[in-house]
Amino acid sequence: MEIRINQGILALVEGDITKEETDAIVNAANSRLMGGAGVDGAIHRAGGPSIMDECRKIGGCPTGQAVITTAGNLKAEHVIHTVGPIYQGGTKGEADLLRSAYLSSLKLAAARGLKSIAFPAISTGVYSYPLAEAAHIALKTAVDYLREHTDIKAIRFVLFDRRTYDAFAAELKKLV
Ligand code: ADP
């Protein structure tokens, strides 16, 4: 599913983010940038050890913020590592932190002059964020960004399974 918003394209695809050819792919990292399961493990495995070397030098990243490294062996040029919130019932500021993870990544990409970016469904795996709510926040942040800025031309959500893709597609239809 693909829609034009202002001067940009917002796309939803089912797939593996490590195969993306966007200027940057986004990693759902943890705050120590120390690697883990899920999409983080997949990115470090596919990209090779240089990404972790850079993460180690950076040292960490607070929840809701983002840092950038090169992308090792991946086709993308950069990996933006952002840290989504661990879902703890929804009363611990999770929604604001999840929005901030997406927005910080978009702003960092734009500040580096990058034109295309691919996101996974941040916080919806090990961090247990309810899928429909997470999809709404992710897409609203992306749609608003494209409406308000013209620097980034393509935002892709690369969703690892059909259930996640379907949840994002349902939320996008409600939003636009
Ligand atoms: P978090 O800790 O932020 O919840 P996870 O990596 O556990 O991060 O999960 C986030 C999402 O990334 C989940 O929907 C998971 O299925 C998905 N995912 C796992 N591997 C990949 C991959 N290679 N490409 C895209 N998405 C992936």
Image (tube, rainbow, N blue to C red):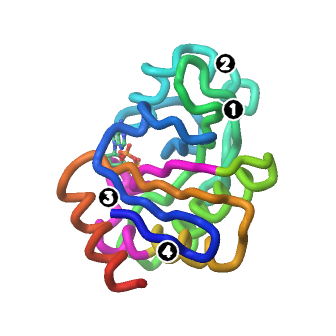
State the extent of the magenta-drawn residues as a range: 116-136
Residue occupied by mark 2? 53
113 lies above or below 131: above
Residue 32: image location, x then y, percent: 60, 37
Which of pointers 1 and 3 lies earlier in the amino acid sequence? 1
Q: CA distance from mark 1 to mark 3?
A: 26 Å
Which of pointers 3 and 2 lies earlier in the amino acid sequence? 2
Looking at the rendered structure, the secondary structure element under dot 4 is helix
Q: Is residue 170 left or right of residue 22?
A: left
Looking at the rendered structure, the secondary structure element under dot 1 is strand
Q: Amino acid at mark 1?
A: Thr
153 lies above or below 134: above
Residue occupied by mark 3? 128
Residue 33: image location, x then y, percent: 59, 35
Q: Nearer the viewer, mark 3 or mark 2?
A: 2
Looking at the rendered structure, the secondary structure element under dot 3 is loop
Q: Nearer the viewer, residue 174 or 32?
A: 174
Q: CA distance from mark 2 to mark 1?
A: 10 Å
Q: For the point 44% across and 70% down, which residue is it?
A: 3
Q: Residues within 10 Å of mark 2 (few under 14, many from 20)?
A: few
Q: Is residue 126 magenta?
A: yes
